Amino acid sequence: MSKISRRKFISTAGATAASAMILHGCTTSTQTTQTPASPEATPASPTGTPGPVAAGDAPEVTTAKLGFIALTDSAPLIIAKEKGMFAKYGMPDVEVTKQASWGTTRDNLVLGSAGGGIDGAHILTPMPYLISNGTVTGGTKLPMYILARLNVNGQGIQLSNEYRDLQIGLDSTPLKAAFEAKKATNPEIKCAMTFPGGTHDMWIRYWLAAGGINPDVDVSTIVVPPAQMVANVKVGAMESFCVGEPWPLQTINQDVGYNALTTGELWKNHPEKAFGMRADWVDQNPKAAKALLMAVLEAQQWCDADENKEEMCQIVSGREWFKVPVEDIIDRSKGIYEMGLRTIPEAEGRELMQKYWRDNASYPFKSHDLWFLTENIRWGYLPPDTDTKALVDAVNREDLWQEAAKAIGQEAAIPASTSRGIETFFDGVKFDPENPTEYLSALAIKKI
């Protein structure tokens, strides 16, 4: 297969498992990265918690296989490995393995480590629900747990330079006429995301629909793995795409397009990736699961400290992790947003940047999971009669997060409620988790 053909992507249509298996989505190959933790690498906890694990709390196993995609919001898993935090809590043999796509992540979770796959992953927040419900696994249900949110904010929606003169930002309305005009010579307008029903799919669909563009009628919403996004827009294979950092900044650095928005502008402090694990692994190894979670929470605090940003970016940029220039990661990690056609003021950028711990970024609010399920119903990935509350209660393990937070001296970080309350989006639409049906009914463009 030529290099050009490898860059081409396959369109997706609907929520079937077949439509999800694209561009490496069916492969189960992984790249394993094992960085031995030396005593010198093991840090003191940010909270001053002693490193040794009490004998009664010793994990049932010392290893787990965790997947990650080359996105900056996977940093807590990488740092927990590199800085010896997994080892500190009795899990020195944890493997953190690179996945080619979200489809690969799904396939390897289905296999489990016993079958050559993985036990858990840095994952798009809706995916554990879609896997648990059998939506993206051909109807086979694999129970999953969400143990923590890994971050808020930090994704981007980009446009190719073909639309540079339109200077599109939060308002996508001008694209409707531009797309219609292009259809005279090119009937398929492609807008890319990373996985059907995932976070990037939800962001680009919401943004397009807010501007009167139906993502199921007016454009082709297609799937491209994150690391292949910039290459595809470079060869003119698509008009727009939504993906996490570092790829939005790389779009600017390679001058192949511009950033319409960073997703914190769409919904301030929106939930994004999660730390998800197979439910059977957690149920069989509750102490090991707690140890993993303690390490991840500590790593999130480390990643969120301003004094660690430079080192974090140097680490994750490495060949064994992202294999990208540190210049494609560092600015957005510090809240510096040069968008190609505009610059976000520094103070605003600090609020919009990816956060791992501050502003309750790590807490897996059930109200946020409910929004994702409601949006998946909106676009036909889940049936309208889905018992969303029961599904959230089955998958979201905020109780385990609370136990781990207490164990590392972060009891004060536990929110008073499992709901963050009413959320307001950039277009003034509000989501009340107490009444998701009202929210859904008020949306003008939807599939149901």
Image: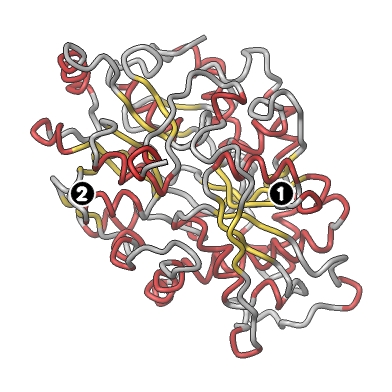
Q: Residue furthest bottom?
A: 40
Give how far across and how far down residue 265 sits, in percent: 32, 41
Which disc, if any, is residue 277? Answer: 1
Q: Residue furthest left?
A: 165
Q: Is residue 23 left or right of residue 369?
A: left
Residue at the image point whose x is 54% and y is 68% from the top:
301
Give how far across and how far down residue 280 sits, in percent: 83, 46
Q: Is residue 76 left or right of residue 251?
A: right
In this rendering, is residue 65 above or below 161? below
Give how far across and how far down residue 52 sits, in percent: 77, 82
Crowd rating for badge 2 (residues with CA inside 10 Å; few <14, some 14–19, many 20+): many
Q: Amino acid under label 2?
A: Met
Residue 187, visible in the rendered structure:
yes
In terms of image quadrants, where is residue 55? Answer: bottom right
Residue at the image point whose x is 40% and y is 77% from the top:
307
In this rendering, is residue 318 above or below 151? below
Give how far across and how far down residue 385 sits, in percent: 67, 13
Which disc, if any, is residue 301? Answer: none
Which residue in the structure is indicated by mark 2? 339
In terms of image quadrants, where is residue 409? Answer: bottom right
* Secondary structure type for disc 1: strand
Between 409 and 44, the one lying in front of the other is: 44
Q: Is residue 175 left or right of residue 356?
A: left
Earlier in the chain: of badge 2 and badge 1, it is 1
Residue at the image point whose x is 37% and y is 74% from the top:
310
